[in-house]
Amino acid sequence: MTPANPSRQRFVDAAFGRPTDLPPVWLMRQAGRYLPEYREVRKRLKFLELCADVPSAVEVSMQPFRRFGMDGVILFSDILIPLPPMGIEVQLDEGGPRLPAPVRTRADVVGLHGFDPAEGTPFVPAILRELKREVAGRAAVIGFCGAPWTLATYVIEGGGTKSFTHVKTLMHREPAVLEALLGKLADACGAYLAAQVEAGADVVQVFDTWAGELSRADYERFARPATERLLSRLPRRGEVPVVLFASGSAHLVESLAATSADVLSIDWKLPLDEARRRAPAKALQGNVDPGALLGTPEGVREAVLAARRAAGPVGHVVNLGHGILPPTPPENVAAFVGAAREPLPA
């Protein structure tokens, strides 16, 4: 490990399955509503305004790092950010995302277009460049995007959904239209994430939040090819590791392991030792239940140590199995990071 930047190198080494002194640690949604300083920023900026305001986005990205000293600092943004420059309107309020003009026909898909991230989302690489300057090698800077399948669910449903009615109707009635949409999303998000790598991201993560809604056969037919198409657009493979997060996907581990991602981010419903047996060639991230951080600091410590023991000593990034919950006490985040830094008891 390079002494000048141990946290950054620790993260990259673990992601590529190389030995480290300790596992790196960060938390999904570590910049967010559980922090009072974040809530202060949100008093003056709506969420999408915050995502596009470079100084403010850098500030909220840095807030958890200043408090807790994680090994990763993730770009503050949202997976829906690439959609407007493709021609898809996105509205976001307290009720969640709303897309007033869903994409449900071949003509709708034809009307979508790719974009140059330097013009369509210039604030994203700008935030990453400033984060690199602020972090100054003390941690890995993390970029991210949504996976094509997960973005397609929002685009087709017109927002969040529990039933996935419209996307599954399209899947079974006009699969070629769904595949065309997934292809356009893969190309656009591939370029978008590639721009983050070029702007200095040390690690990138692809969020496939709704992958678990698919059977293995449907994941193999629709989601995995589109995800791989996105990953094929990324530069510096072998230098900048790729994490693939797929929630609720214990039934898909072998399919996820067949992608070219370097790290699989596992939720708390699948033991990490089982994930290790089923995906032996991949590093693992996770997998503490975010609900554990609503308990006591000692309970948090025990949950982190249990995850570390299950994952084994090599190729593990300590994280939650999903995003941190807004009611989480900050002292429990401190306990989470501290437990990742402890020598593991024999």
Image (tube, grey):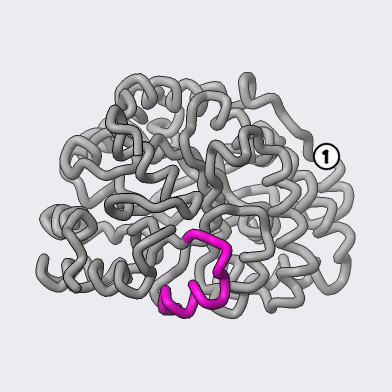
Looking at numbered disc 1 in the image, what kind of residue is underneath it?
Answer: Gly
The image quadrant of residue 288 is bottom left
Q: Which residues are magenta?
A: 270-283
Q: Is residue 273 magenta?
A: yes
* Residue 286 seen in the figure: yes
Question: How far from the left and from the top, in percent, is residue 43?
Answer: 24, 36
Whether 9 is drawn above or below 298: the answer is above
Residue under numbered circle 1: 111
- Please report the residue visible at 39 percent of the width from the left and 53 percent of the height from the top: 19
Question: How far from the left and from the top, in percent, is residue 197?
Answer: 56, 31
The image quadrant of residue 1 is top left
- Please report the residue visible at 58 percent of the width from the left and 49 percent of the height from the top: 146
Whether 332 is drawn above or below 185: the answer is below
Of 192 and 115, the residue lying toward us:
192
The secondary structure type at the circle numbered 1 is loop
**Count of picture labels:** 1
Of 33 and 309, the residue lying toward us:
309
Of 278 and 219, the residue lying toward us:
278
- The C terminus is located in which quarter? bottom left
- Please report the residue visible at 75 percent of the width from the left and 48 percent of the height from the top: 229
Q: Is residue 259 magenta?
A: no
- Please report the residue visible at 50 percent of the width from the left and 28 percent of the height from the top: 124
Q: Residues within 10 Å of mark 1 (few under 14, many from 20)?
A: few
* Residue 329 seen in the figure: no
Left or right of residue 48, residue 288 in this image: left
Question: How far from the left and from the top, in percent, is residue 147?
Answer: 62, 53
Left or right of residue 95, residue 159 in this image: right
Question: How far from the left and from the top, in percent, is residue 201?
Answer: 48, 32
Left or right of residue 183, residue 142 in this image: left
